[in-house]
Image (cartoon, rainbow, N blue to C red):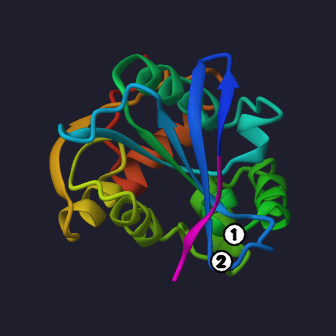
Amino acid sequence: MIKIQAEANVPTEHGTFRMIAFSENENDWMPHMAIIAENTDFTKPVNVRFHSECITGEVFHSKKCECGQQLDAAMKYIHENGGIIIYLRQEGRNIGIINKLKAYSLQEKGLDTVEANLQLGLPADDRNFGVAIEILNLLDVKNINLLTNNPEKVKYVKDSNIHLNSRVPLQIPANEISKGYLKTKKDYFGHLLDDNDK
């Protein structure tokens, strides 16, 4: 069972947020995080983003995905409207950074993101959003607006004890490099995206 291990206010370029670390033990160097805007009203549906770690996109601004831009957009949105980002340590759809770089290498040879994972003997997507539900329960959140394009995240909420009030799209325009990645998200995973090939 995870629990709160530490929390503090953290000023960022998007505003100040209450950051809370969740893990089973206090020595965990990779805890899940809740990033809570100061103006969040817990008596109303709370804006929530489930966001999986992406070191290449968030730290190094990779153009292969839109993860870093989605995180920035989510932080801006919840700073302005109140809400929570549940930051999950599930790098590379939960295959880890080493396997992710191996998959990138295969993509350089023409495979798409799903084909590369499968050729490595890995799942197309091994993420589990159950821990995000657990964190929301620990924060006593009952009713949410979910910032996502991913129907799997919607399903996790609908199958939980938390009420899904609405889905808020969080789409980032494709660039020349990310176009194929976003097409695979739409075609294989059913992500709710507008066409990015125009």
The residue pinned by badge 2 equals 122
Q: Amino acid at mark 1?
A: Ile
- 183 vs 48, left or right, is right
The residue pinned by badge 1 equals 95
- Whether residue 159 is situated above or below residue 70 in the rendered picture: below
Circle 1 crowding by C-alpha within 10 Å: few under 14, some 14–19, many from 20:
some
What is the quadrant of residue 162 in the picture? bottom left
Helix, strand, or loop for circle 1? loop
In this orientation, does residue 44 appear? Answer: yes
- 82 vs 104, left or right, is left
- Whether residue 4 is situated above or below residue 142 in the rendered picture: below
What is the quadrant of residue 100 in the picture? bottom right
Residue drawn 47% across the image and 40% down it = 183
Which of 177/23 is in front?
Answer: 23
The magenta stretch spans which residues? 1-7
Residue drawn 58% across the image and 19% down it = 15
